[in-house]
Amino acid sequence: MAASACDQDGSEPSNARYGDCPVSGQYGEFQLSPETAGALTVRTTLPAPGWWNGDTPDSVKSGYEYCMAANIAYRSGLDRVNVKNAPFPEVVSGRTKDFDLALAQITITPERSKVADFSPPYLSSTLGLLIRDGEKINQDNIRDVRIGVAEGTTGEEFVGDRIKPVRPVTAFANDPELITALEEGRIDAVVHDTTILLAYPQKQESRVSLVGQYRTDQGYGALYPKGSPDKEELDRIIRQLIDDGTLAKLSAVYLGAAFGRDPAKIPYLTVDDGS
């Protein structure tokens, strides 16, 4: 059940807005120094079905990461979530400071940790292999086909460093362009986060299949501006959301519907170096 948002005197904040998200825990238990007074400013990359349900910042009212942000805001005594949309490479670049945290299915990597700070991981990540229905592409012939990736992602790095295809790799600015290119036959396969790709075979008129996933031993984290004064407090909130089961509930509600299948049952793939 969603908790009632209350001011310190017990009254409900008159301007609290968290979309359609259930919020829980103690309102105002944690103290942040937010970028914008009264709001939690979150950067992300739209669209991201299941994670941020809506195509524009103003239209997003639900989704795993949006409702995660809503619960962080609620427990910090902030009455709304201010969503800022940006291309993924910009989100992880470390060049901008006008936000409190970024939630965009960001895999924690040593390279990104040089320019930004991260929370504890809140979800493990693997890389999925998406192909057109009827194609016979697998771990044995993946090097010989045209692979598409999302620009600036760990999938792009994995393809170049581990799969090492013989044909040029094409990087796309956003996920819809990437999937459209696959459906139209301009590329033969997509390597991208499994938890993102799972949504596409479920769509009506879908012509793609998720046939396997690569282990990465990595996880998603909230990204903070380097040196953020709120890192310790935000880390505490996210650990609390993990420990009290809030994130597990959000996963069941929002990602379960988007996935349509259990990620753990997707076959695991290997590359020639034995990984």
Image (spheres, rainbow, N blue to C red):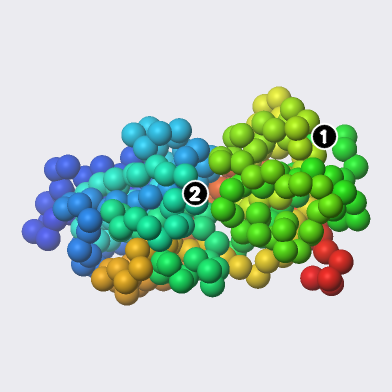
Is residue 143 among the parts visible in the rendering?
yes
Q: Is residue 241 left or right of residue 248?
A: left
Residue 119: x, y in percent?
Answer: 43, 69
Q: Is residue 251 left or right of residue 246?
A: right
Residue 60: x, y in percent?
Answer: 39, 37
The residue sitting at 34% across, 44% down in the picture is 83
- Quadrant position of the C terminus in the picture: bottom right
Image height of 133 relative to 52, above or below: above
Task: Name the residue beneath numbered marker 1.
Answer: 133
Task: Name the residue beneath numbered marker 2.
Answer: 88
Is residue 123 among the parts visible in the rendering?
no
Query: What's the amino acid at mark 1?
Result: Asp
Query: What's the amino acid at mark 2?
Result: Phe
The residue sitting at 64% across, 45% down in the picture is 171
The residue sitting at 47% across, 44% down in the picture is 87
Crowding at dot 2, Cα within 10 Å, few <14 / some 14-19 / many 20+, comes out as: many
* SS category of the residue bearing label 2: helix
